[in-house]
Image (spheres, grey):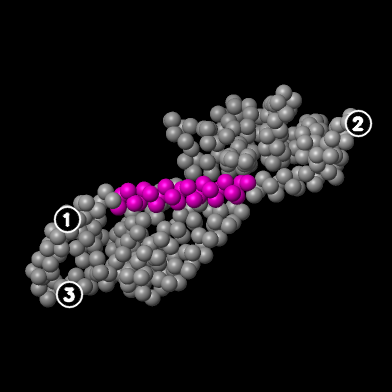
């Protein structure tokens, strides 16, 4: 990847990079931008959000291209991006001075209309240093606002996509669930009726053990799933046995919900006990709402935290009134 960026010789939009025909995963993106040979910055125009990278060896080429682009089309986008990357600190004093002079010229259009008009009439098309500092500060505030707005838009779109996906899955399963509901209830009743007192005691003890494990996970700040249960059962049950046991006996004691993230960090439904919900459900809901609100309004929102808190909030709002 580093060689590809080095050979590019210019600014590269991360969203356009493909590996075996696929966009970069969040893990690869993080790997790229954390490389000490790579300059990185976020940028937003009026409509879109971008993540740009530039190999440090390509800075002189990128500067020349940005200058040429501005000269030919008055487009200062690449100059603005390079300035955000603070590339002046990575080049020779002569190159830094040359870039700053061209950046200064590109700031002329950000002066007030009458100032531009007056200076143009007298052929004094310049931006003074104190004006440049003010313009840079204003543009940086505006740029951060745009980036935040685009990130929030992206997060909301992703939340909508996840919700629609869940609705679709739920709709697809509803027909099958309706068909199998009577059969499953009959099997459960027959299973319960066929158990002797000793078997019932064993089932209750095992169920309580699973509830305790799940509760301990939540107390430790872990989102317990079937993998977590298997690890803590320490070989007492196989995965198949655990799934069958949960299907037959856990309906009244354990709830589950799905957390969808870009990294697919949670492949299995998250488990939580009725006991835990009764005791801490309201507190969990308040915490989830606070976290999701903070991510919505934060300058640098964390997508994974937003996904987790939103999933918990959605589940608890649907479930708590029924308990």
Q: Is residue 96 something that shows in the picture?
A: no
Q: Give the range drawn in magenta.
A: 146-170
SS of the residue under disc 2: loop
Disc 3 or disc 1, which is closer to the eye?
A: 1
Return the residue at label 2.
122
Residue in the image at 48% along x and 38% along y:
24
Is 235 rendered above or below residue 47?
below
Q: Earlier in the sequence, mark 3 or mark 2?
A: 2
SS of the residue under disc 3: helix
> For residue 201, which numbered disc appears in the image?
3
Q: How far apart are marks 3 and 1 (CA)?
A: 28 Å
**Closer to the camera in the image, 146 or 306:** 146
Q: How far apart are marks 2 and 1 (CA)?
A: 84 Å
Q: Do the residues labelled 3 and 2 touch (CB within 8 Å)?
A: no
Residue in the image at 33% along x and 54% along y:
268
Disc 3 or disc 2, which is closer to the eye?
A: 2
Q: Where does the image place residue 26, in percent across and percent down from the top left?
A: 49, 44
Please identify the quarter of the rendering in which residue 281 is found: bottom left
Residue in the image at 27% along x and 69% along y:
253
Return the residue at label 1.
180
Q: Earlier in the sequence, mark 2 or mark 1?
A: 2
Q: Distance between the residues labelled 3 and 2?
A: 96 Å
């Amino acid at each position: 990847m580093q060689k590809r960026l080095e050979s590019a010789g210019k600014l590269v939009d991360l969203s356009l990079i493909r590996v075996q025909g696929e966009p970069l995963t969040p893990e690869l993106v993080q790997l790229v931008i954390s490389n000490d040979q790579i300059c990185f910055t976020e940028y937003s125009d009026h409509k879109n959000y971008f993540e740009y990278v530039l190999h440090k060896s390509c800075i002189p080429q990128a500067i020349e291209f940005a200058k040429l682009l501005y000269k030919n089309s008055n487009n200062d986008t690449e100059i603005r991006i390079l300035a955000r990357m603070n590339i002046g600190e990575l080049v020779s004093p002569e190159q830094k001075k040359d870039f700053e002079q061209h950046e200064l010229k590109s700031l002329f259009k950000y002066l007030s209309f009458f100032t531009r008009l007056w200076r143009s009439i007298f052929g004094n098309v310049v931006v003074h240093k104190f004006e440049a500092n003010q313009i840079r500060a204003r543009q940086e505030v505006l740029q951060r606002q745009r980036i935040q707005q685009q990130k929030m838009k992206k997060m909301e779109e992703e939340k909508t996509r996840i919700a629609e996906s869940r609705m679709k899955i739920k709709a697809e399963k509803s027909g099958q669930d309706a068909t199998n509901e009577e059969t499953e209830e009959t099997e459960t009743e027959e299973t319960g009726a066929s158990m002797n007192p000793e078997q019932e005691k064993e089932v209750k003890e095992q169920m309580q053990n699973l509830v305790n494990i799940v509760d301990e996970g939540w107390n430790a700040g872990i989102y317990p799933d079937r993998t977590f249960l298997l690890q803590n059962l320490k070989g007492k049950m196989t995965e198949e046995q655990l799934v069958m046991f949960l299907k037959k006996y856990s309906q009244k004691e354990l709830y589950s919900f799905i957390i969808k993230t870009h990294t697919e960090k949670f492949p299995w439904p998250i488990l939580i006990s009725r006991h835990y919900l009764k005791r801490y459900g309201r507190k969990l809901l308040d915490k989830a709402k606070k976290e999701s609100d903070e991510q919505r309004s934060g300058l640098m929102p964390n997508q994974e935290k937003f996904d987790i808190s939103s999933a918990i909030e959605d589940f608890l709002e649907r479930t708590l009134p029924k308990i």
